Amino acid sequence: MIMSKTLFLLSFLVFQSLSANPLAEQFKQLGYSEICNKEQGSETFDSLYAHFDEFIAFLQKNPSWAKKLYIAKERFIRSKERNYYSTDFFGFYDESEKEGRKQIAFYYSTHFHEFVCSRYKEFNEVPEITLFLDTCRNIQNPFGTLFQQAASEIGLETIFSSEYGEPPVLFKVIKYLPSYNVLRPHYDGTVFSFFLDSTDNQSLLLSPYKSLFTVDDFFSPIRVFPRETKKSSILIIPGTFLAEFSIFPTPHIVTKSGQTRYAAIAFAMRPNYTAQKNEFSLLPAFSH
Ligand SMILES: [Fe+2]
């Protein structure tokens, strides 16, 4: 795994050295930066989505397990480890029946995984749960190193400093149902968000930060690195936790496609951080 991390980091470094604009400038001009994920391609993510479907089917068929997972999450957000991530988003969010949402998501972190498996040993005996959690752990593993590299690139080497020694990675897997239809873009409460993979890149629209937005400001970035068997494209955007350093967040929206869409995102969180009250520019409503 160390070798894998090194190779992954090299891919990133190669991209950075080829890039004409430093990261902060790319965020300002385009709203994002793209790097090539040479270690994880469509096979990796398709397998993740297949395990996610099995995990969802198990929890929907066994609501008592979904409840147990929810209780575990409620306990976890009262633990010390929660502050490392500075968020309460962990675990399973089934909004498949919720009008205006129509999506199912899982927020994974290594500390939450360890918490669940050590306090609720029965989870270790359900293959639909263990396979999915283990797949999440393997995929999110290299991103702590990449988050640190991106922070260094913008001169914020110490932003992830904590007793844990590496950046907090919150990994999200999401399934949008064909009836999904969210109308307004949003900002992420993160340092960086890495859009790792999606089965439909066209539906993700974003815009560099502005003082005034219209729907026409939002576009689907043209990918330099296509989704292939062995590699994929990663888009990096800044979240709201960089505003105090004059790096403003990139608003984004997943538009309605009428199809099932899967995506995987790695969020760089900020240890022991209380979000400041910031008034970011209002975001326009899309009508589909
Ligand atoms: Fe987002």
Image (tube, helix red, strand yellow):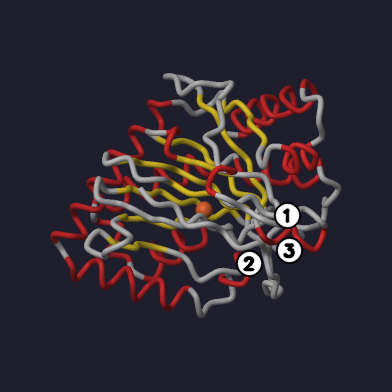
Mark 3 or 1, nearer chain start:
3
Q: Nearer the viewer, mark 1 or mark 2?
A: 1
Q: Quick check: marks 2 and 3 in contact, CB under 8 Å?
A: yes
Q: Residues within 10 Å of mark 2 (few under 14, many from 20)?
A: many
Residue at x 48%, y 40% (from the top left corner): 139
Q: Which amino acid type is shown beneath numbered disc 1?
A: Phe
Residue positioned 82% across, 50% down in the render = 157
Residue, disc 2: 84
Q: Position of residue 125 (x, y in %)?
A: 25, 56
Numbered badge on residue 198: none
Separation of residues labelled 2 and 3 (CA atoms): 8 Å
Name the kind of residue labelled 2 in the image: Tyr
Position above or below: 243 against 256: below
Q: CA distance from mark 3 to mark 1?
A: 24 Å
Q: Position of residue 272 (x, y in %)?
A: 69, 71
Determine which residue is flagged by label 1.
248
User: Residue 108: percent from the left, percent from the top?
Assistant: 45, 56
Q: Quadrant of the N terminus?
A: top right
For the residue marked with disc 3, what is the amino acid?
Ser
Number of numbered discs visible in the structure rendering: 3
SS class, disc 3 = loop
Residue at screen point 18% across, 52% down: 57
Q: Judge left or right: residue 21 versus residue 109.
A: right
- Left or right of 173? Residue 165 is right
Residue 278 falls in which quadrant of the image?
Answer: bottom right
Query: Label 2's element?
Result: helix
Q: Are marks 3 and 1 in contact (CB under 8 Å)?
A: no
* Circle nearer the N terminus (1, 2): 2
Drawn side of residue 187 relative to residue 173, left or right:
right
Residue 162 shows which numbered tag? Answer: 3
